[in-house]
Image (cartoon, helix red, strand yellow):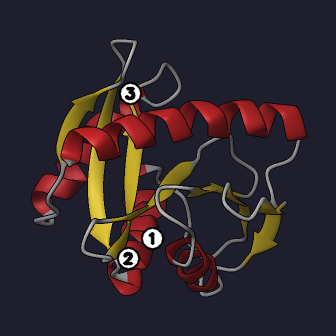
Amino acid sequence: MVVSILLTAATMLVLALAWRLWLGSKGALHSLPELKRSLRQLLECGANTGFIIITPRGTKYFIQFNSYVLRDGRRGMEMAFPNADWSKEFFARLKAYCDANGIAHEIQFGNDHPMRFLVVDCQADIDRTHDLIKGIVGDVFGLNVDRQYHVLFYDFTSKKQEH
């Protein structure tokens, strides 16, 4: 199950990056409290078909979450943070942040490439996911969390997009 979720996450990341470049947009602006609405929207997506990219306004940094539905019908969302050129410094900080705060995580590899991802399964816990976003923005990226966020949402099932 974890391997299939990773495959989905890696695929979604590649698609998300291509989508972001193709659109030329970072998505609609939301306040920090409004991000919970976007997370709820992600949980409503079909099986392994939705993702959101959250970008703190004025930065090139982003956090991506994808949705999943387990065989028993439980829904959840998962963050897969890449160890890419732009994020190497943040990858190490994020791992330390997760370790220090007791956040369960795994280091996984992509499908057809050696890139590593730090993966956090947030399940369906919107508050925990929201706290993770605040921690990444504040403690990992070193930014003020009281800012606006671009949110790019896509659900492949319904072709619904927001940008």
Q: Quadrant of residue 110?
A: top left
Circles 2 and 1, Cβ within 8 Å, touching? The answer is yes
Picture quadrant of residue 113: top left
Q: Position of residue 70 (x, y in %)?
A: 29, 65
Residue at the (70%, 80%) spot, across then down: 31
Dot placed on the residue nearer the N-terminal end, 2 or 3: 3
Which label was assigned to residue 134? 1
Q: Which residue is mark 2?
A: 131
Per the image, label 1 sits on a secondary structure element best described as helix
Location of residue 13 in the rendering, given as x and y in whole percent from the top left corner: 54, 37
Q: 134 left or right of 41?
A: left
- In the depicted structure, whether residue 1 falls above or below residue 161: above
- Residue 117 is situated, as x and y percent measured from the top left of the image, at 33, 34
- The residue drawn where x is 20% and y is 49% is 1
Q: Name the outermost residue toward the right.
A: 24
Q: Residue at x 66, y 85 (%)?
A: 34
From mark 2 to mark 1, how far is it between C-alphas? 5 Å
Residue 44, above or below 77: below
Mark 2: which amino acid? Asp
The alpha-carbon separation of the residues under discs 2 and 3 comes to: 21 Å
Q: Amino acid at mark 3?
A: Asn
Residue found 62% across the figure and 85% down from its top: 37
- Pinpoint residue 61: horizontal percent, then vertical percent: 60, 43
Image: 4 above or below 163: above
